[in-house]
Image (cartoon, helix red, strand yellow):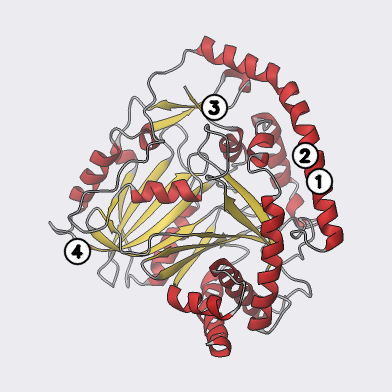
């Protein structure tokens, strides 16, 4: 049986109609490269053949009776590709604005938990002649790395080359468990939890002591609950707004090389901080102190856990939005992020996954309902302002079932209290930036996305 890890299951428990926990990717495809030309029926058929025997796409959630344990993945005996691959036509004039509006609408719709937790929307009618594909997968099933792997499963390095291999970790689910077996396993898991909790206490005390010592030395990562409040830090709705844009990766790398000790991620965070500063200045709401971002960190290479799809941790970092000069901001972030990385490395990779074992559907469900109904995110300390993720992709072109990928824009979840997510993915010499937000808090995310090239130019003019 394929049981969800506590971290995987937490994304199910955290989900509400407003706080949707799926991740998305918007692909812009060139149909001219497809060997047989583009027809929706052919594309849907190719997707159907590719996913037919792959558990990641044909399994669904089965809950354990009485919530005694985390849910399991089981095969969907009624899997139907037409429930997962849909065809839409973009309204005229078919530009980026119309595409962003449609993607925002689709991103605000939850996935049906009675079926495998993914969907693809094939969008035609783009004025550019391209075809867009919006892929949605639940966070319980993928993290950033697994999500990229899931999309690459449909890709090749040439239009007519064989598709990339199936990752070896995606193994078939062999049977469906009986109800009595689920109850027995749940009772056993419940009985083990006090001992697991006791085993977690001592190392956690050590982690906290180390964090305190680093804080005294001025070498700790930024602390949560210390973020300034902005217009996108409050209770979110289920409505989403979306924007996307590209940056040249060679320029970003040249800027990185011009500042000793800096990394590509430092440059991305510096540009993000500058874009946020411009956006908030335009709205006359720039805080005196820096915004605080949560940055997801993959621990696939460090974790000792084999169970679970999400192998991720996170670190907190200041974005330097209180610094006007972009070069000074980059120098500051290079130091801040170096401390944050060292601090993060001192925390065992499995810490978040181990603590997530104790997550329970009733506790999380009650808490999320209270957060929404009482609008708790509108008051008190702000945990963090937004999420920023950066996922490295391949340096060469990719072809989605024969169609060259011209753009690949990741769109992550947003949370109560942090209604903005900026996600970046590299592909073939470009950085593809996806911005998604609560529509009521950030009605025009294109204003924020449009500031990214301006910040890149400001850094380039000063350093190159």
The x, y position of residue 402, in whole percent, is 22, 56
Of labels 3 and 1, earlier in sequence is 3
Of labels 4 and 3, earlier in sequence is 4
Is residue 324 among what the camera can see?
Answer: yes
Going by the image, does 390 lie left or right of 359? Answer: left
Q: Confirm or deny contact between disc 1 and disc 2 (CB under 8 A).
A: yes
- Residue on which disc 1 sits: 208
351 w.r.t. 131: above or below: above
67 w.r.t. 352: above or below: above
The quarter of the picture where residue 15 lies is: top right
| Crowd band around label 4 with a 10 angstrom C-alpha radius: few (<14), some (14–19), many (20+) | some
Helix, strand or loop under label 4? helix
- Residue on which disc 2 sits: 204
| Crowd band around label 1 with a 10 angstrom C-alpha radius: few (<14), some (14–19), many (20+) | few
Q: Confirm or deny contact between disc 1 and disc 4 (CB under 8 A).
A: no
Q: CA distance from mark 3 to mark 2?
A: 26 Å
The x, y position of residue 13, in whole percent, is 61, 36
Of labels 1 and 4, earlier in sequence is 4
Q: Confirm or deny contact between disc 2 and disc 4 (CB under 8 A).
A: no
At horizontal 18% and vertical 59% (from top left) the residue drawn is 34
| Crowd band around label 2 with a 10 angstrom C-alpha radius: few (<14), some (14–19), many (20+) | some
- Residue on which disc 4 sits: 33
- Residue on which disc 3 sits: 71
Q: Residue furthest bottom?
A: 461
At horizontal 22% and vertical 63% (from top left) the residue drawn is 31
Helix, strand or loop under label 1? helix
């Amino acid at each position: 049986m394929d049981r969800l890890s506590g971290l995987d299951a937490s994304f199910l428990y955290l989900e509400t109609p407003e706080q949707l926990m799926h991740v998305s990717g918007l692909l812009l495809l060139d149909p001219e490269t497809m060997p047989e030309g583009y027809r929706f029926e052919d594309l849907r058929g190719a997707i159907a053949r590719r996913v037919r025997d792959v558990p990641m796409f044909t399994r669904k959630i089965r809950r354990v009776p009485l919530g005694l344990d985390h849910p399991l993945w089981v095969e969907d005996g009624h899997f139907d590709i037409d429930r997962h691959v849909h065809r839409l036509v973009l309204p005229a004039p078919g530009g980026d604005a119309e595409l962003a509006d449609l993607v925002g609408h689709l991103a605000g719709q939850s996935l049906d938990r009675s079926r495998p937790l993914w969907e693809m929307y094939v969008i035609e009618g783009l004025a550019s002649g391209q075809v867009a594909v919006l892929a949605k997968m639940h966070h319980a099933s993928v993290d950033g790395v697994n999500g990229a792997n899931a999309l690459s499963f449909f890709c090749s390095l040439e239009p007519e080359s064989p598709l990339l291999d199936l990752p070896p970790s995606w193994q078939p689910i062999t049977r469906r468990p009986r109800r009595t077996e689920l109850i027995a396993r749940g009772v056993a898991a419940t009985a083990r939890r006090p001992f697991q909790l006791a085993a977690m206490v001592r190392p956690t005390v050590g982690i906290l002591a180390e964090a305190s010592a680093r804080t005294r030395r001025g070498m700790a990562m930024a602390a949560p609950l210390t973020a300034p409040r902005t217009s996108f830090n409050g209770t979110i709705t289920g409505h989403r707004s979306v924007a996307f844009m590209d940056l040249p990766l060679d320029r970003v790398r040249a800027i990185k090389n011009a500042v000793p000790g800096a990394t590509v991620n430092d440059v991305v965070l510096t540009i993000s901080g500058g874009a946020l500063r411009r956006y908030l200045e335009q709205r006359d709401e720039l805080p005196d102190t820096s915004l605080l971002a949560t940055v997801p960190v993959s621990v696939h290479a460090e974790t000792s856990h084999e169970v679970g799809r999400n192998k991720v941790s996170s670190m907190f970092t200041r974005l330097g939005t209180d610094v006007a000069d972009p070069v000074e901001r980059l120098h500051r972030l290079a130091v801040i992020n170096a401390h944050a990385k060292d601090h993060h490395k001192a925390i065992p990779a499995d810490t978040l996954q181990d603590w997530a074992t104790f997550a329970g559907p009733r506790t999380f469900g009650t808490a999320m309902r209270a957060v929404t109904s009482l609008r708790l995110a509108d008051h008190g300390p702000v945990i963090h302002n937004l999420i920023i993720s950066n996922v490295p992709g391949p340096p060469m072109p990719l072809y989605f079932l024969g169609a060259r990928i011209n753009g690949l824009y990741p769109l992550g979840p947003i949370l109560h209290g942090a209604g903005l997510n900026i996600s970046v993915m590299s592909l073939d010499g470009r950085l593809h930036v996806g911005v998604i937000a609560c529509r009521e808090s950030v009605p025009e995310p294109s204003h924020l996305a449009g500031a990214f090239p301006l910040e890149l130019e400001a850094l380039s003019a000063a350093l190159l």
